[in-house]
Image (tube, rainbow, N blue to C red):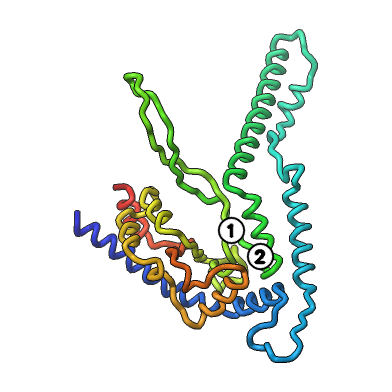
Amino acid sequence: MAEEQSAILEAITTFGADLKVKLLEHLKQRQPIVQRWVKDMYQYRNQYEESIKTNKSKVFVGYTRAKTDSWTAQMTDMLFPSDDKNYGISPTPMPEIANIAKQPDSEDPNLRNQISNARAIMQQAKESAEAMEKLIDDQLLECDYVAEARLCLHYAAVLGTGILRAPVVDVVESKAWKQDSLGNWVGEIVNKTIPAARLVLPWDFVPDMTAPTLKDCQFVFERSHVTKKQLQALAKNPYYLKESVLELCELDGGDTRTASNDMDGYVDTLRTLSGLETQSKDNRYELWTYHGGIPLNVLSGANELLGE
């Protein structure tokens, strides 16, 4: 049994090493786009690039920021109106049932039953749609969807690329008091899954650079940064290997960084112009999420380990 687990872990580790090589390769291929983002960010910030600064006039005509912010505000007002919702849920039209439900009451028992059943179905569908709409409203409010979407629009206007990942599944702890069989109140901690939406910074997203469009990508990589507390919480997530997460917690956050001297300079410039610290000062753990094909032996092996 131990030898089998060791073989599975070795296969997963080898697959992870292959993914890292693929990631670094596509990071280099993405480099011209990152350089363009840096120019766009300087333009938005009304600043000259370091390479063209001189001792001459430093006047910068700042039209770009005003136009960009105006577009972002208009799109935000149109997509997320403050006095209304931008969506609604209603029952799927069923012509036959709707026509029967609209008929006046009849003295014919069979027809009366059909009309009554049709009205009951329409009423149930309406109540279910209203309940689902309220549930979605609560979930969108809880995950702060509007704020994340506004940031997505901001980066779409400034850099030409806005990325919003949704829905994602978050695991949170729910604490409650319940009565046991003897009538005593006991505290209980339950892990529950909730939907969420999350902004992905453009420089933290690496698609398949050989694909002409996103839908043609064979894989994508996504980078996120988590604190040690957040990383420890992943050990309780049933979709992560607990031992691997705890082993990662023993390392320092800087040890998990994907270092590349020829690319970090541009990313640090983007982070600085966006009001963030440079990567060297960010002590959080760097996590990369891979979306793409996985060999069957690796997938089945991981399922066995998670099942235990």
Q: Residue 219 at x, y = what percent? A: 50, 65
Left or right, 132 with reference to 169: right
Q: Which residue is mark 2?
A: 155
Query: In the rendered image, which quarter is residue 125 located in?
Result: top right
Residue that protrudes farthest toward the bottom in the picture: 55
Coordinates of residue 236 in the picture (x, y in percent): 37, 48
Seen from the viewer's position, the closer of residues 49 and 200 is: 49
Image coordinates for residue 226, horizontal then vertical, percent: 45, 59
Question: Residue 199's mark?
Answer: 1
* Above/below status of 52 relative to 172: below
How many numbered discs sit on the rendered protein? 2
Going 70% across and 9% down the picture, which residue do you hit?
A: 109
Mark 1 is surrounded, within 10 Å at the Cα level, by few (under 14), some (14 to 19) or many (20 or more) other residues, namely some
The quadrant in which residue 247 appears is bottom left
**What type is the residue that disc 2 sits on?**
Tyr
* Alpha carbon separation for disc pair 1 and 2: 10 Å
Contact (Cβ within 8 Å) of mark 1 with mark 2: yes
Quadrant of the rendered structure where residue 176 is? top left
SS for dot 2: helix
Mark 1 / mark 2, whichever is N-terminal:
2
* Residue at the image point whose x is 64% and y is 35% from the top: 134
Label 1, secondary structure: give it: strand
